[in-house]
Amino acid sequence: MQTHTLVTGRRRSGLRGAPVGAALAAALITAAFVVPRIASDPWRRSLYAGAAPLFGTWLPHAGWGTIPAVVVAAAVVLYGPTLAGSLPWRRLLALAWLTATTWAFALAMVDGWHRGFAGRLTDSNEYLHEVAGVTDIPAMLRGFSGRILDFQPDSWTTHVAGHPPGALLFFVLLDRVGLSGGGWAGLACMLIGTSTTVAVAVALRALCAQDRARAALPFLSLAPAALWFAVSADAMFAGVTAWAVALLAVATRSASRPIIAVAAGMLFGFGIYLSYGLVLMALPAVAVLIAARTVRPLLPALLGALVVAAAFTGAGFWWLDGYHLVVQRYYQGIAAERPFAYWWWANLAATLCAVGLASAAGLHRALSWPRVRALDPTALLVLGGVCAMVVADASGLSKAETERIWLPFAVWVLAATAFLPRSGARAWLAVQSLGALLIAHTILTNW
């Protein structure tokens, strides 16, 4: 009787905790939207985000992606939990990736083909603007650091300067193989970005948490983060690093451990040449090793990462030089004016818009001390994602636009939905989809 009472008490606490977590997240998001509306004009302009905390402008609108997006959302809400529990594993992963991709594309099409998809990466501050000028890849790599600082004739555009050369190299290689233009670039970013749905599930299953993976998959497929998966290079960054974590998890169990661990390390290594901030993916990686209770894949993974670092260094780009120059470039632009007093907490609100209220609802259970102490794999991966965000936030180098910049960390926070009560899964999926649809139809996002 006493044991039954304790279990029942914990269940009721979990049921109460989920709406409380979502309500607190909703309050933070509301505050982040309201404060700029009631602030003085000069201060509001200093945010450089018309729909702060999201980077975009207020513009209620609809498009031909509206009806498909509603249909996808309804289908996942109605059938997602059942299919996640019954389909064979590989078929489930294929369906989840297809659903995530369809959802992301439909949300992008709310803004139209050019504005919502094909034209996003062709902006004058974006990567494709520089692709045509790269006629010699080795020369680009050797001279990359010399063009990072602003206010010189050959300065890189904002996004190229703000990242290591791996990001530009990716789009240059796409162009070289004949996949040129914004449509192909957007498709590549979207497909790689939405594959995080599969990568997170693969990582959880490798760590003996298949039930949690199945519970989370409908939420991963219907994530509000899809708003930025179809339109930003950060989606590609998220995909690369998510598979690095997934392969590392597989390496802890596989008979081909060294080979898979080297592959994971190479993806981690390439990740830090896509974005400087992705060094923080070390935190989810550590979470994997702790959850698996082994460090055996560590050395081959480090070897794989060093191979990539050696290749970029040998080609003439020294990562630390690039990082120090990027910090200077960061404060040459609008970041010097954006107030940290607002963005340190509004960053979190923006990211909550990407992971949705359902993720916030599951966080209190995912991060509970008993689960963390017991080395629950899902809880540890969620904790790794949260810690990466906290460190990035504290650095002061992420002021605004974190709904896309933190996508590589956010995909692991989405796994917190696995801890929601199964009886309420459809209701929380509805909350997730309604949040994404509301943003897509009221804010014209820049990404």
Image (cartoon, rainbow, N blue to C red):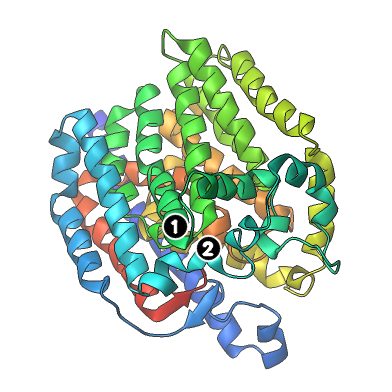
Residue at the image position 35 percent from the left and 47 percent from the top: 417
Q: Is residue 408 visible?
A: no
Q: How many marks?
A: 2
Amino acid type for the residue under numbered disc 2 = Leu
Spot occupied by residue 20 in the image (x, y as percentages of width and height): 39, 60
In the picture shown, does residue 190 fall above or below 266? below
**Mark 1 lies on residue:** 186
Under circle 1, the secondary element is helix
Q: Looking at this rendering, what residue extends furthest in the bottom direction?
A: 41
- Indicate the amino acid at tag 1: Gly
Q: Is there any visible trace of residue 136 in the rendered image?
A: yes
Q: Is residue 366 above or below residue 265?
A: below
| Label 2 close to label 1 by CB (< 8 Å) | yes
Residue 34 in percent (x, y) is at 53, 82
Residue 254 falls in image quadrant: top left
Image point 26% across, 29% down: which residue?
Answer: 3
Residue carrying label 2: 121
- Residue occupying image coordinates x 13% and y 55%: 78
In the rendered view, tell whether residue 65 sits above or below residue 252.
below
Q: Quadrant of the N terminus?
A: top left
Task: Answer left or right for 82 relative to 238.
Answer: left
**Relative depth, front residue between 199 and 130:** 130
Secondary structure, mark 2, is helix
Towards the viewer: 184 or 280: 184
Residue 185 x/y as whole percent: 47, 55
